């Protein structure tokens, strides 16, 4: 039996026993595997240990009970295997950022539609074009991603939390099993992404969205996913597909190479003159300098941690890892690695890459490279520091194939 099937069976076992405090040994025994092998295999496929997955599944199911039933918090706590309302409340707040009672008060009403609150034109226009789609809550969409594959869907979870977003489905908006999310980045057209695990569901959204001749949309597939019927439908509809890979660093430590005459360190506001000189030398663009300045001023993404690499007293490479927090997890995107001509060599790029990996691991965060491209798909920048080939050399692995479709 293939590993994916075995993992799916283990997930099914966990989901059928939400009220049990399952041990790693018990889950491994049910799957028919040795403890060590099963734990490592499960983490590679899901991003969680089996026990962690069981905890997250309990919390997401308990959240649904808070939203859609009148059960007391005590009854819900006992139903999902918590010894007391207090232990349930602590675990729930650590994951959702609010107490069970606060969550119920916030989400027990009808789903909030962000376009109604914000007046965002792009999302409103999308809704009018696709009346078949029913509105669902972003929180339920995050639950879906967390309990299916948080590594593959990490970028989707981040996108749903940093922009005005509406979640829409062709199915049941309460028992959410597939959906599209539509995000507004102040562009005329919204960013549209399909999220589903089954090919037949994906085809239904594909046929619906392709009715709009100008619409672009994307979807993440598992790396080893082969959907022949879906791909045939893409071709039949005359769509093109451009794809990249979402990658993560799966290990707990990294060996940072010896600097060999170079210096690598985190940058501070006192380095702005150096950063601007790096820009003047062709290292990066004005928008990157502006983003760093906004970060140092405390007005932008507080998760950014600029890193510079110096040779002969001159900054020759710049990395911009940026951290997002979704519930109780931290995710770092490598963001960008930029170099001047003096920094375009493998030892320099490897040093700054591995320094950033080590820095992110110290924060107990997942480090990823969103949408890495193969060199033959990125002809304008051969041997890119962020290519699939270079990312794999640094120890990252593919966890999702990001497919972008358009006419």
Image (cartoon, rainbow, N blue to C red):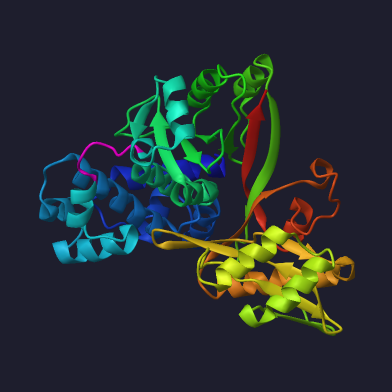
* Residue 131 drawn above or below residue 300: above
Foreground residue, 308 or 126? 126
| Membership of 403 in magenta stretch | no
Task: Report the magenta residues as a range.
Answer: 107-113
> Quadrant location of residue 67?
top left
- Residue 57, position as x, y percentages in the image: 34, 50
* Residue 243 drawn above or below residue 301: above
- Residue 348, position as x, y percentages in the image: 82, 72
Foreground residue, 95 or 27? 95
Q: Could one spot residue 123 in this view of the protein?
A: yes
> Quadrant location of residue 328?
bottom left
For the N terminus, the image quarter is top right
- Magenta stretch prevailing secondary structure: loop
* Residue 286 drawn above or below residue 312: above
Foreground residue, 39 or 315? 315
What residue is shown at x 37% (from left), y 43% (from top)? 138
What residue is shown at x 10% (from left), y 50% (from top)? 72
Farthest top residue? 236
Taking the image as shown, residue 122 lies to the left or right of residue 213, namely left
Taking the image as shown, residue 109 lies to the left or right of residue 176, namely left
- Residue 236, position as x, y percentages in the image: 66, 14
What residue is shown at x 55% (from left), y 44% (from top)? 3
What residue is shown at x 76% (from left), y 61% (from top)? 393
Foreground residue, 307 or 46? 307
| Membership of 112 in magenta stretch | yes
């Amino acid at each position: 039996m293939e590993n994916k099937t075995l993992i799916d069976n283990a997930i099914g076992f966990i989901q059928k026993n939400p009220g049990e405090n399952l041990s790693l040994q018990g889950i491994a025994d049910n799957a028919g595997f040795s403890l060590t092998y099963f734990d490592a295999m499960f983490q590679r496929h899901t991003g969680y240990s089996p026990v962690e997955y069981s905890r997250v599944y309990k919390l997401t199911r308990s959240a649904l009970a808070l939203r859609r039933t009148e059960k007391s918090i005590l009854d819900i706590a006992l139903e999902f295997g918590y010894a007391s309302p207090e232990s349930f409340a602590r675990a729930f707040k650590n994951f959702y950022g609010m107490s069970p009672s606060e969550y119920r008060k916030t989400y027990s009403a009808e789903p909030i539609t962000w376009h109604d609150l914000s007046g965002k034109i792009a999302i409103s226009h999308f809704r009018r074009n696709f009346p078949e789609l029913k509105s669902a809550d972003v929180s339920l969409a995050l639950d879906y991603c967390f309990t299916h594959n948080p590594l593959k869907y990490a970028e989707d979870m981040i996108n749903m939390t940093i922009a005005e977003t509406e979640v829409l489905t062709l199915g049941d908006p309460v028992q959410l099993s597939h959906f599209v999310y539509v995000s507004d980045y102040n562009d005329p057209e919204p960013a549209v992404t399909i999220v589903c695990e089954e090919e037949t569901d994906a085809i239904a959204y594909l046929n619906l969205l392709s009715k709009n001749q100008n619409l672009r949309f994307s979807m993440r597939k598992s790396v080893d996913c082969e959907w022949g019927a879906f791909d045939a439908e893409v071709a039949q509809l005359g769509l093109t597909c451009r794809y990249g890979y979402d990658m993560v660093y799966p290990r707990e430590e990294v060996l940072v190479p010896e600097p060999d005459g170079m210096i690598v360190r985190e940058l501070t506001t006192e380095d702005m003159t150096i950063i601007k000189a790096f820009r003047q030398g062709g290292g990066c663009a004005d928008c990157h300098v502006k983003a760093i300045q906004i970060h140092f001023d405390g007005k932008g993404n507080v998760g950014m941690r600029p890193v510079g690499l110096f040779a002969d007293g001159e900054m020759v490479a710049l990395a911009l890892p940026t951290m997002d927090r979704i519930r109780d997890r931290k995710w770092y995107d490598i963001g960008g690695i930029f170099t001047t001509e003096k920094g375009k060599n493998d030892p320099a790029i490897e040093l700054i890459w591995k320094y950033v990996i080590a820095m992110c691991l110290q924060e107990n965060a997942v480090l990823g490279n969103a949408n890495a491209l193969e060199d033959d798909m990125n002809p304008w920048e051969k041997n890119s520091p962020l290519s699939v080939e270079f990312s794999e050399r640094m120890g990252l692995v593919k966890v999702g194939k990001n497919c972008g479709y358009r006419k």
